[in-house]
C-alpha cells in the first residue's frame, strides 16, 4: 500500500468511526504489569537510553496503529527538564532489505543497526515536576505495528544528572474491532 | 440524508465548516462529567456508568474527544468509553443503560468497550484538557454512551467523564 493509499484509508476510517477500538497499553494488573507506562531511562544528557518494552510481541495479535503517547511519573531528577521520547518497533529492515522481527527490546539493543532502525516517532515534553497533569501526546499520522511486532520506547533529556532520569511511557493504540458477540 | 451523505458532508465540513456542530454531553442541566468509580483493586475497571442515555441520542453522532474532571485523588486514570449497542449475528441489541449492560454479563461488558484514554493527574488543581480521539467512535441513533475507569492505586477512586460529540447540523 502506498503512503497515499494509507492516508486515504485513515481518512475514510476517521469519518466512519466504526469497526475499531482504541486501547491503552500497558494494562492489567495480571502478571505484574500495571495500568501505567513502562519505565524508560535516559542514557545521559542528550543521549538516548536503551529501548524498553512497552508492549511485548505476544500482545499484538492483530495489525495495530499507534496514535498517541501517554507519559507518567517522571522521577525526581526529571523535574524542570525537557524529555524527548521515541516510540519504536521490534521490526527492522537492514540496508539489504532483510526483515528481522527482534524478540524484545534487549535483542534490539544488542544490534547497533537495529537500535537505529527501530525508531518510529519522537515526541517532546517539558516537565516541571511530577505534580501536574500529563496530557496524552497524539500523533498526527499513526504508526503501523503489524501483528506479532513489539512496541518499544526510549528517552533522552536535557538535564540528566547522572542518576539517569526516567519517565513511564504508555501507548494509545487503535485496532479493528466490531464489539460483536456470538 | 443517509449516513454516507452525512460522512461526505463531514468530510467537506473539515474545509467548509457549515453543516456540523460539536456538543458536550452530559449537557445543560448537569454541566459536569458523569462520575466513574474504579474497583477497589489496582488496575481493575469499575462498573460502566451512563454518560448519555439512549433517549438523548436522537441522531447519529461521532465521539471525537473525552473530557475528564474532578479526580478524587492524584492517580493514573485509565478511562474507557463505550456504547450500549452490542452487535451480534442476529443484528445486535441496544441495552437500556449501563446497568443493563452490566446485567447482561461479562461478554457484553467487554464488547461495549470502544476507546480508552489515560492520564496522570497529581491533584484536582490543574487543567485537564480534552483528550482528542484520532479515530472517532460512531454512535447510532438510540444508543447510549457509557464510561468506566480503573486506576493504578485502586481504592475506588473516582473521576468524572464527558464526551465531545460531532453531529450533523444545518
Image (cartoon, coloured by chain):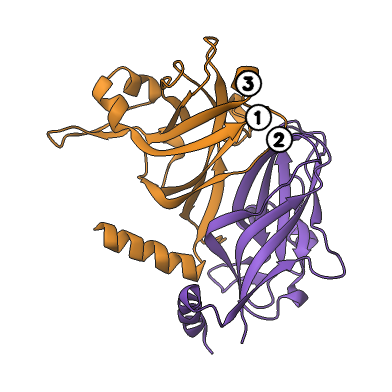
- Mark 1 residue element: loop
Say which residue label 3 marks.
Answer: A75
Q: Nearer the viewer, residue B12 or B61?
A: B12
For disc 2, the chain is: A
Instruction: Give the percent coordinates (x, y) of residue A98.
Output: 16, 34
Q: Is residue A87 left or right of residue A179?
A: left
Q: Is residue A57 above or below residue A32?
A: below
Q: Nearer the viewer, residue B121 or A104?
A: B121
Cα–Cα gap, marks 1 and 3: 11 Å
Q: Residue at x 65, y 29 (%)?
A: A128
Q: Is residue A40 above or below residue A4?
A: above
Q: Residues within 10 Å of mark 3 (few under 14, many from 20)?
A: some
Q: Which tag, 2 or 3, sits closer to the chain's start?
A: 3
The chain drawn in orange is A
Q: Nearer the viewer, residue B110 or B71?
A: B71
Q: Is residue A138 left or right of residue A135?
A: left
Q: Is residue A138 left or right of residue B58?
A: left
Q: Residue at x 70, y 80 (%)?
A: B58
- Mark 3 residue element: loop
Q: Are marks 1 and 2 in contact (CB under 8 Å)?
A: yes
Instruction: Give the percent coordinates (x, y) of residue A60.
Output: 43, 41
The chain drawn in purple is B
Q: Are marks 2 and 3 on the same chain?
A: yes
For disc 1, the chain is: A
Amino acid at each position: 500500500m502506498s503512503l497515499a493509499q494509507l492516508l486515504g484509508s485513515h481518512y475514510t476510517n476517521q469519518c466512519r468511526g466504526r469497526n475499531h477500538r482504541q486501547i491503552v497499553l500497558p494494562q492489567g494488573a495480571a502478571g505484574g504489569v500495571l495500568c501505567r507506562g513502562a519505565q524508560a531511562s535516559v542514557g545521559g544528557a542528550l543521549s538516548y537510553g536503551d529501548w524498553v518494552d512497552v508492549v511485548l510481541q505476544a500482545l499484538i495479535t492483530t495489525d495495530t496503529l499507534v496514535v498517541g503517547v501517554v507519559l507518567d511519573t517522571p522521577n525526581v531528577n526529571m523535574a524542570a527538564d525537557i524529555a524527548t521520547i521515541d516510540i519504536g518497533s521490534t521490526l527492522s529492515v537492514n540496508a539489504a532489505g532483510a526483515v528481522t522481527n527482534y524478540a524484545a527490546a534487549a535483542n534490539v539493543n544488542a544490534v547497533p543497526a537495529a537500535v537505529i532502525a527501530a525508531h518510529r516517532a519522537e515526541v517532546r515534553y517539558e516537565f516541571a515536576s511530577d505534580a501536574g497533569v500529563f496530557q496524552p501526546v497524539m500523533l498526527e499520522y499513526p504508526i503501523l505495528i503489524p501483528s506479532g511486532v513489539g512496541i518499544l520506547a526510549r528517552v533522552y533529556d536535557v538535564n540528566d544528572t547522572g542518576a539517569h532520569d526516567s519517565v513511564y511511557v504508555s501507548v494509545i493504540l487503535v485496532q479493528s474491532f466490531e464489539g460483536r458477540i456470538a | 440524508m443517509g449516513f454516507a451523505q452525512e460522512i461526505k458532508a463531514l468530510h467537506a465540513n473539515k474545509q467548509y465548516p457549515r453543516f456540523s456542530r460539536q456538543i458536550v454531553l452530559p449537557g445543560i442541566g448537569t454541566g459536569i462529567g458523569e462520575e466513574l468509580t474504579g474497583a477497589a483493586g489496582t488496575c481493575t475497571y469499575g462498573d460502566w456508568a451512563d454518560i448519555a442515555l439512549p433517549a438523548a441520542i436522537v441522531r447519529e453522532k461521532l465521539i471525537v474527544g473525552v473530557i475528564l474532571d474532578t479526580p478524587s485523588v492524584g492517580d493514573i486514570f485509565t478511562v474507557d468509553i463505550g456504547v450500549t449497542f452490542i452487535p451480534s449475528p442476529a443484528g445486535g441489541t441496544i441495552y437500556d443503560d449501563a446497568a443493563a449492560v452490566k446485567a447482561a454479563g461479562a461478554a457484553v461488558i467487554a464488547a461495549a468497550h470502544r476507546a480508552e484514554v489515560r492520564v496522570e493527574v497529581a491533584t484536582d488543581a490543574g487543567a485537564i484538557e480534552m483528550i482528542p480521539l484520532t479515530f472517532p467512535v460512531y454512535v447510532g441513533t438510540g444508543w447510549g454512551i457509557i464510561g468506566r475507569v480503573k486506576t493504578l492505586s485502586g481504592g475506588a477512586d473516582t473521576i468524572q467523564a464527558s464526551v465531545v460529540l460531532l453531529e450533523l447540523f444545518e
